[in-house]
Amino acid sequence: MTVEVEVASKHLTSRVIHELLFSTRKKKFIKPALSDKYNGMLIYRLKRGVYVKFSLRALKKSDYAKFSISYVKVGFATVIEEKPIFEIELSYSAFLQIAFELGVPYVLKEFVRMIPEYHQVAKVDEPNLPEDKDAPQIIEEIKEYLQKKVVSQ
């Protein structure tokens, strides 16, 4: 039995909303079943289990970005629970630089690389390789990296 889960994915003139789901079992970003470019949504068909949702909300003109990570639990009767784990604010330009920096956790770099292009939705593609660490380790590395980055701004 699968459950449909929608996440936002759009790149507009003044703002970016970028959300992707990460499989804790396969240790990589999941390809959505459908992309709704018109409404700026990615639609996943998920089995029961726990997933990690990476989310970026940015205001380009204000150079502001809010990045968050949360657990998404898909239960039996299509019950979906979302539990926030981490949230941080930084400049949007600094967040985009993550794709070009060394020493960035691989999963975070992939998330930044997949930010949707202007008037598009995100595309989860093949270079998205499985990570050799488990989800809590990945999340902890990302938290530490971003906290250091914000302090250095």
Image (cartoon, rainbow, N blue to C red):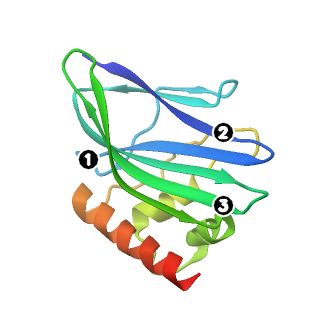
Q: What residue is disc 1 on?
A: 24
For the C terminus, the quadrant is bottom right
Give SS at disc 3.
Answer: strand
Q: Is residue 69 visible?
A: yes
* Figure quadrant of residue 77: top left
Pick whichever, 10 or 133, lies toward us. Answer: 10
Q: Residue 142: image x %, image y %? A: 38, 67
Is 54 left or right of 1, judged from the image as shown? right
Does residue 47 sit above or below 10 in this rendering? Answer: above
Which mark sits nearer the N-terminus, 1 or 2? 2
Give SS at disc 2.
Answer: strand
Residue at 33 percent across and 70 percent down: it is 141
Q: What residue is disc 3 on?
A: 64
The residue type indicated by label 2 comes to: Lys
Camera-side mark, 2 or 3 = 3
Which mark sits nearer the N-terminus, 2 or 3? 2
Q: Residue 103: image x %, image y %? A: 44, 80
The label on residue 69 is none
Does residue 69 sit above or below 8 in this rendering? Answer: below
Q: Is residue 133 visible?
A: no
Is 98 left or right of 148, judged from the image as shown? right
Camera-side mark, 1 or 2 = 2
The residue type indicated by label 3 comes to: Tyr
Camera-side mark, 1 or 3 = 3
Q: Residue 82: image x %, image y %? A: 33, 37
Q: What residue is disc 2 on?
A: 10
Residue occupying the far bottom of the picture: 152
Q: Residues within 10 Å of mark 1 (few under 14, many from 20)?
A: some
For the N terminus, the quadrant is top left
> What is the CA distance from the residue labelled 2 to the residue labelled 3?
16 Å
Residue at 75 percent across and 39 percent down: it is 119
